[in-house]
Amino acid sequence: MDIKNYRPRIIDAKIESLLDAFGAVCIEGPKWCGKTWTAIRHSNSQVFLGDPSGGFQNRQLAQINPELVLTGEYPHLVDEWQEAPSLWDAVRYKVDSLAQKGLFILTGSATPNHKGVLHSGTGRIARISMSPMSLYESGDSNGKVSLMDLFNGAQQDTLTGNVNLMHLINLTIRGGWPAAIGVPDNVAFELPKSYIDAVVQDDVWRIDGVKRDKRKMNLLLRSLARNESTTATNKKLKNDIKDIDNQDVDIDTIAEYLNVFERLFILNNQLPFSPDIRSSVRVKQSEKRHFADPSLACAVLGVSSSMLMNDLQTYGLLFESLCERDLKIYAQALGGQLFHYQDYNSFEIDAVVQLSDGRWGAFEIKLGMNQVDEAAKKLLRICESAKNKQGTAPTLLGVICGMSNASYKRPDGVYVLPITALKN
């Protein structure tokens, strides 16, 4: 497979470091996000279980005798390993036997049932999550603003260039799929649309061979899209389907289907955060719901760029999802995590990035500059609240904007950060 046009990914450096520390690395994430090309770049030999040659010969060999597909120059790539789940234990055993680092790279676009997988692989196989491209990776952010520099107080005020709202909407509809980069705006929606069709028509059945109600799956996907960037509970999704689609889906069915979507990596929710690491907020508050890419929500809703231009309230939620997709990628590159904040008084902060050293930053996400002042007040309030509760105060406060042409630090200490200028 020729990867001469490979576009570097932020995750590349992390994969290299994990290969130095573990016998094998498993790259997980949604289909078409670039896992295979990235894995090829870091491997010296490959086997593709999805290759249809010889009646899917590679897959059959893996099921009959896993050792046969684990032969090759290290690091050896096994693409879509979940097609033969017994490979997981075979890789773990090989790593134990050879006692070497960087032997295998596995890629997976679905999590198989635990049946057939005997060992977790802890200490032998490192898992890493891969997302579709951020704006910086796709070349749609100029990278003049570094998240790391912001945390270290080294980011300088800078002009970042004008932003066209229609262009920003088109980037959201297109998504971060490598195959969609450079595709004309008027057809860019076709790839995420076909992705959703493939999930419902084929992927959900292939994950465990269980036939599920496609109509109910579509109803749930539409409800998830309507509740993108919200903390809607399963009960809220059920009521939403009843109220808007005039259909009833059992709460247990919703839970089952959500689990399947998560195993296919098409959902990418944000966990709740508290500056007090012992706080119950981390475990009692709801996750914020997201598709793996905002383009999937656009595809499910069937919205066009002109429709979103005339409904900026809806686009505001999709823009928030776009920004949080990118923040998660940038945070992961710094060894951090992305959260959202919501306390028991319903006070919310859109995004929180916490680094491995405990420092954290709070971010509000706003499409227009006219919303910055109010967003800054919210951020200052959470900073003061953390101090009063003797918790750890945030190192960084920022408003991520869509329509700003400059990145700068306000007199109150809050940064204004254009998403089209941000990088890790």
Image: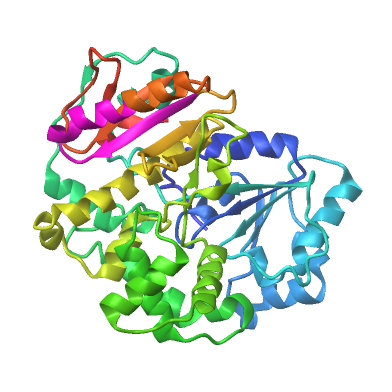
Q: Is residue 92 above or below residue 307?
A: above
Residue 35, image x and y in percent?
53, 54
The answer to whether one can see residue 160 in this image is yes
Figure disc tally: 0
User: Is 378 situated above or below 281?
Assistant: above
Residue 171 x/y as whole percent: 24, 50
- On screen, residue 378 versus residue 86, left or right, reads left
Most extreme residue toward the front is: 345
Front one among 355 and 329:
355
Residue 192 in the image: x percent, y percent?
Answer: 34, 65
Question: Residue visible at 25% across and 64% down?
Answer: 189
At 44% across and 62% down in the image, what residue appears? Answer: 233
- Image quarter (top left, top right, bottom left or bottom right) of the C terminus: top left
Residue 205 place in picture, x, y as percent: 55, 81
Q: For residue 12, what is the image quadrant?
A: top right
Q: Which residue sits at x=46%, y=62%?
A: 266
Q: Is residue 264 above or below residue 208?
A: above
Magenta residues, start to end? 360-379
Q: Is residue 234 left or right of residue 335?
A: left
Task: Residue 9: tell me if it is visible.
Answer: no
